[in-house]
Image (tube, rainbow, N blue to C red):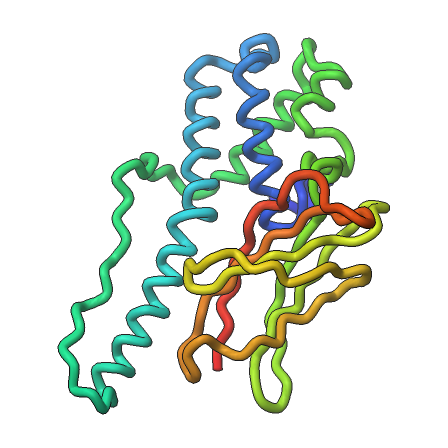
Amino acid sequence: MTTRNQPYFPGSESASIAWLIHFAAKLAPCGEQLGLSAEEIAATLADIKFYVWYITTYYPGIQQAGLEATAYKNILAYDPANTLRPLPVMASYEDAPAVRPAGILSRLFNLIQRIKLSPAYSAAIGQDLGIIGTQSIDTHNYPGLTLEIQRNETQEYVVVKFTKYQHDAVAIESRRSNGEWENMGISLKKPWLDMRPLLVAGVPEVREYRIRWYNDPTTSGEFSPVQKITVGP
């Protein structure tokens, strides 16, 4: 069972994470009413917790570690200063959730199919869980955001695509290599292109983006979930 068969499940990664967090918060209060056992509810919540943690914390951390290892390799080979540098420090995750079996989304979609067949199921419950139609939990709170990499004759750059949902524009913020957030400006039309050169020439870097509504003359609403992408030389 894939996301193409689930019209309620958002297509973008950031929106799907917001949807999962919302679903997890709503499942426990109505799960037993819908015929789910306490064990099933607990297992589903554990699945979602691990999946969200992996996508938002572990995977970006591994990407960043790879970039730092590449930068260290280049310095180790060619640093003209002959300096002694400590090895890059690998991230540790003391509060990491327990690893779950593969197939998390497939199990979740099967569970939702069972929920919809429950005699206790109603449209109101479906709306509350976010499992009806094409609704996306984040649509009314912050803009939709997707990223992709493109290349011209001299460099890679980031294409920032967004959905305004009838607002005037979006305000874009970005940071690089875990630095400070920078205000990148206001965009009325998509896409917005991030053509900045790399912080260190020849060394790939992770760029993070978040956006919020801009309705002239002020920003409003929540920031979108942070999205990350790696830009190379």
- Establish if 211 lies above or below 7: below
- Nearer to me, 69 or 113: 69
- Establish if 4 lies above or below 44: below
Q: Position of residue 14 (x, y in %)?
A: 59, 47
Count of numbered marks: 0
- Nearer to me, 176 or 71: 176
- Establish if 2 lies above or below 182: above
Judge left or right: residue 62 versus residue 14: left
At a point 38% along the width and 39% down the height, the residue shown is: 101
Q: Position of residue 38 (x, y in %)?
A: 45, 13
- Nearer to me, 102 or 219: 219
Q: Position of residue 115 (x, y in %)?
A: 63, 21
Check the picture and name the quadrant holding the N terminus: top right
Q: Position of residue 41 (x, y in %)?
A: 48, 20
Question: Could you say which quadrant of the image residue 179 lies in?
Answer: bottom left
At a point 59% along the width and 13% down the height, the residue shown is: 30
Question: Could you say which quadrant of the image residue 74 lies in?
Answer: bottom left
Judge left or right: residue 198 versus residue 16: left
- Establish if 89 lies above or below 218: below
Judge left or right: residue 69 versus residue 1: left
